[in-house]
């Protein structure tokens, strides 16, 4: 089958087979894709295909490549792993691990439709896991001990991913910085400087989750991410959005950073929880928690004290109890789409490995940096039937060993 146009699916895209369009943001179109390894197995990944106008912007491309390379160094259970970065057919792309589930926005919408509140233990759990991701990223260092200086800049519900197993991951580290540095928005033809800033905010970071210094265009650091995590905590505990209005209105509120007291929701020892929020949401960064770890420790102390600790297992059970039908339907639909795509359009055989960081001359265009070059299929390699027999024999051997162990006890 001949690959179709950019809008047609399925279609080959470098080492990937794009088979489901799952979203579009201010920076990229987002696809569910398959990558196949040399044994014929496939791995489901997410490919973010950067919009053409941004891919063609040299300054933006260099910043995105730099930030994506930094993000690719992160390897933590609460961070979505970047596995590939490159340029294909003139389009920059980032490939990352696929988390099967909802983002936090989608989950909250599902709960709202059912008029089902998110239990406090799971609200606290989600924010604790986000803080664990931020703590790890903020402390990440080069091999020689030099801090990487990673700041997320866009800690918001759409970047908090929740798997059907109840695991929480944060994605898109550093991408907002590339959007902040989009020089096109600073050109005179974009008109009023204030409007230019609003345009940047719309794509670079959700103004409703920005720290005051970020909304004012000042330097940001790890404490800015702490403020955004504080807004997440406030909203999940309050059951409503903190800032409401159009883009200009929310940006003005973010600059002021005026956060009301948490409404009375019957939470245990709400005074202590309010003290955590007060410190996280202080306008002056120097008076805030100075790190994500500090806020995490304070939040865990509260959760332990009021017996509101949760685990991925318990959260996953909650999701299954209330969303099992939707989860199964989504999984089956994507499995069918993937199988249909694989049967109609083939992709090069490739092994997916973490991104490496080769030396790069600033004048050269970004290239794939993962070392995931296509490998020709070996004529002497095992076929699908041989592999099935092999794995069947392995399974039988494992079952026999397990039975022997059990009888020997």
Image: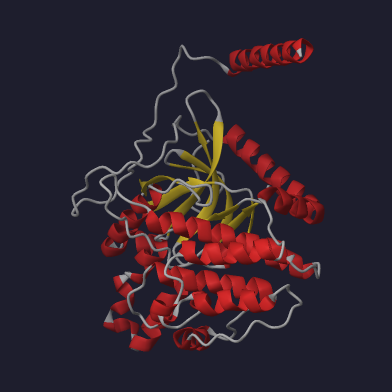
- Position of 210 relative to 165 (above/below): below
In the rendered image, residue 46, in percent from the top left (x then y), is placed at 52, 48
Tell me which corner region of the image, top left, top right, bottom left or bottom right, holds residue 223.
bottom left
**Colour convention:** secondary structure
The one of 289 and 99 positioned closer to us in this rendering: 289
In the rendered image, residue 103, in percent from the top left (x then y), is placed at 61, 59
Tell me which corner region of the image, top left, top right, bottom left or bottom right, holds residue 262.
bottom right
Residue at 50% in and 50% down: 80
In the rendered image, residue 13, in percent from the top left (x then y), is placed at 45, 43
Q: Count of labels shown?
A: 0
Q: Is residue 384 visible?
A: yes
- Position of 401 relative to 219 (above/below): above
Residue at 41% in and 40% down: 354
The one of 84 and 233 positioned closer to us in this rendering: 233
Q: Is residue 123 visible?
A: no
In the rendered image, residue 293, in percent from the top left (x then y), is placed at 48, 61
Query: In the shown orientation, is residue 394 left or right of residue 43?
Result: right
Query: In the shown orientation, is residue 357 left or right of residue 20?
Result: left
Residue at 73% in and 64% down: 110
Residue at 48% in and 34% down: 347
- Position of 157 relative to 354 (above/below): below
Query: In the shown orientation, is residue 218 left or right of residue 227?
Result: left
């Amino acid at each position: 089958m001949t690959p179709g146009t950019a809008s047609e699916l399925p279609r080959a895209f470098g080492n990937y087979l794009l088979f489901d369009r799952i979203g579009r943001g201010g920076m990229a179109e987002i696809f569910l894709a398959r990558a196949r390894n040399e044994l014929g197995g496939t791995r489901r990944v997410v490919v973010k295909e950067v919009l053409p106008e941004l891919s063609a912007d040299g300054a933006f491309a260099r910043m995105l490549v730099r930030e994506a390379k930094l993000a690719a160094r992160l390897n933590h259970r609460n961070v979505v792993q970047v596995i590939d970065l490159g340029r294909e057919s003139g389009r920059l792309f980032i490939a990352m691990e696929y988390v099967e589930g909802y983002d936090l926005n989608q989950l909250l919408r599902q709960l709202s439709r059912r008029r089902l509140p998110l239990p406090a233990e799971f609200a606290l759990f989600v924010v604790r896991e986000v803080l664990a991701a931020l703590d790890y990223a903020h402390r990440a260092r080069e091999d020689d001990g030099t801090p990487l200086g990673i700041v997320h800049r866009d800690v918001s519900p759409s970047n908090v991913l929740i798997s059907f197993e109840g695991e929480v991951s944060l994605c898109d580290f550093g991408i907002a910085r590339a959007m902040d540095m989009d020089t096109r928005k600073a050109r005179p033809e974009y008109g009023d400087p204030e409007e230019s800033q609003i345009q940047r905010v719309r794509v670079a970071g959700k103004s409703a989750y920005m720290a005051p210094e970020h909304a004012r265009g000042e330097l940001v650091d790890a404490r800015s991410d702490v403020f955004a995590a504080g807004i997440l905590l406030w909203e999940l505990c309050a059951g409503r959005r903190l800032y409401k209005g159009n883009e200009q209105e929310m940006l003005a509120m973010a600059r002021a950073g005026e956060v009301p007291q948490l409404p009375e929701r019957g939470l245990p020892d709400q005074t202590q929880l309010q003290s955590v929020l007060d410190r996280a949401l202080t306008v002056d960064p120097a008076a805030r928690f100075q790190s994500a770890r500090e806020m995490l420790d304070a939040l865990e102390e509260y959760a332990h004290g009021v017996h509101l600790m949760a685990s991925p297992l318990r959260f996953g059970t909650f999701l299954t109890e209330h969303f099992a039908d939707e989860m199964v339907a989504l999984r089956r639909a994507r499995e069918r789409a993937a199988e249909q795509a694989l049967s109609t359009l083939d992709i090069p055989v490739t092994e997916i490995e973490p991104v490496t960081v080769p030396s790069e001359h600033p004048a050269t265009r970004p290239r794939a940096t993962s070392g995931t070059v296509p490998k020709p299929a070996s004529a002497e390699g095992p076929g699908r039937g041989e592999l099935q027999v092999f794995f069947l024999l392995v399974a039988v051997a494992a079952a026999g060993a397990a039975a022997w162990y059990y009888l020997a006890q």
